[in-house]
Amino acid sequence: MTVSNGPQPDDGLSLRFWGVRGSTPVSGPEYAEFGGSTPCMEIRCGERLFLLDAGSGLGACGRHYRDGLMHALPQSIDLLFSHLHLDHTAGLPFFKPVILDAERTLNTYCGNLDGASAGEALERLFSPPLFPVSLDILPCTLAHHGFRAGETLTFADGARVDTILLNHPQGSVVYRFDHAGRRLCIISDIEHSDPWPDAALLDFVRGADLMVYDGMFTDCEYPVCRGWGHSTWQKGAELAQAAGVTAMAIIHLHPSHTDAMLHAMEAEMRVVMPSAFIARERQIVAVGAPARPTARSLPLALTA
């Protein structure tokens, strides 16, 4: 698994983390390495772009492409929501190179509302008195699409993305991307079941080259947060190993977990699963590619 900050081959499957923190953004020197923005990921299947979640990290994604890279964004962009909690939606109006361009269309896909789209919920959220303006004043076209988790999304260009529903308050969707013989599964928000691993989820992620997993809590924190809809890296490792997953990346990092805490957690995790790592903002992962060694045998830490 190659992790870097440089460009990836345009025919492979790659993932870039724009936001990896859970619940609320954080900032400060103690968060400099892993980052403080809430969930947003960029998936490239060859040149085909998907965005997953619109947390505060979506703003950094937009700034990156605004600065001379607008040609790398298609005129019609597909944004997949795991669910619509604030930490996964708050960045939407700040994706400026897209929402301020009258020639662009932003398609949203939501699968945890029993077939309903995200449109009504987003219109309630981004309107007075909670937000100064409503989304209908934006120059871009917003097109909202609903589906039921468990369905396969099929796009006009032939791209396909598989889905399944997760255990999370109001539900959450895991997305599976298959491209160029590689498989990527992104599990953003989940509370593990008992017994574990869940049979349906185990089958869904089986054989993935990379599984991204919600590791918000430590084993010590989880008992008092039971029912909040999140998991631990230990449960992620159990699922990954049972399903024959090659590598695991932990996201939805707790806002109080500093760089020092996450380094210690990562070292402990890699004893159990050497190919596992904690995601850093702006990391690019070439899914399924051979790993390049680093001085510390850890994924590269990328800075803004």
Image: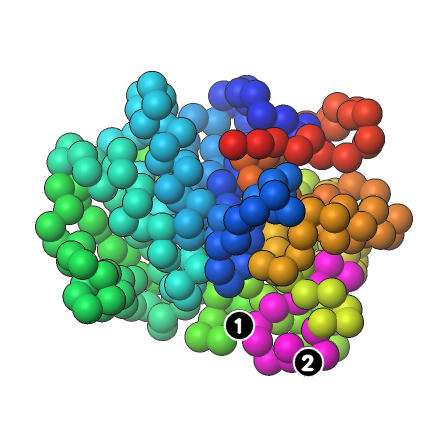
Horizontal placement of 116 versus 45: left or right?
A: left
Residue 73 drawn above or below residue 55: above
Q: Amino acid at mark 2?
A: Val
Q: Is residue 103 visible?
A: yes
Which element carries disc 2, helix, strand or loop?
A: helix
Q: Is residue 185 visible?
A: no
The residue located at (61%, 56%) in the rendering is: 253
Chain-order first, disc 1 or disc 2: 1
Residue 271 drawn above or below residue 204: above
Q: Which mark is residue 142?
A: none
Q: Position of residue 81 (x, y in %)?
A: 40, 56
User: Where the N terminus falls, by quadrant?
Assistant: top right
Horizontal placement of 284 versus 145: left or right?
A: right
Name the image quarter holding residue 257. bottom right
Q: Which of pointers 1 and 2 indicates the residue nearer the eye?
A: 2
Cα gap from disc 1 to disc 2, whole angstroms: 16 Å
Q: Position of residue 30 (x, y in %)?
A: 64, 47
Q: Give the residue pinned by disc 1.
A: 168
Q: Position of residue 295 (x, y in %)?
A: 81, 25
Horizontal placement of 110 versus 261: left or right?
A: left
The residue located at (54%, 68%) in the rendering is: 166
Q: Amino acid at mark 1?
A: His
Q: Give the residue pinned by disc 2.
A: 224
Q: Is residue 231 magenta?
A: yes
Per the rendered image, the range of residues in magenta is 222-235
The residue located at (41%, 66%) in the rendering is: 85
Q: Please name whichever residue, 282 or 183, is drawn nearer the observer in this view of the structure.
A: 282
Which element carries disc 1, helix, strand or loop?
A: loop
Q: Please name whichever residue, 82 or 114, is drawn nearer the observer in this view of the structure.
A: 82
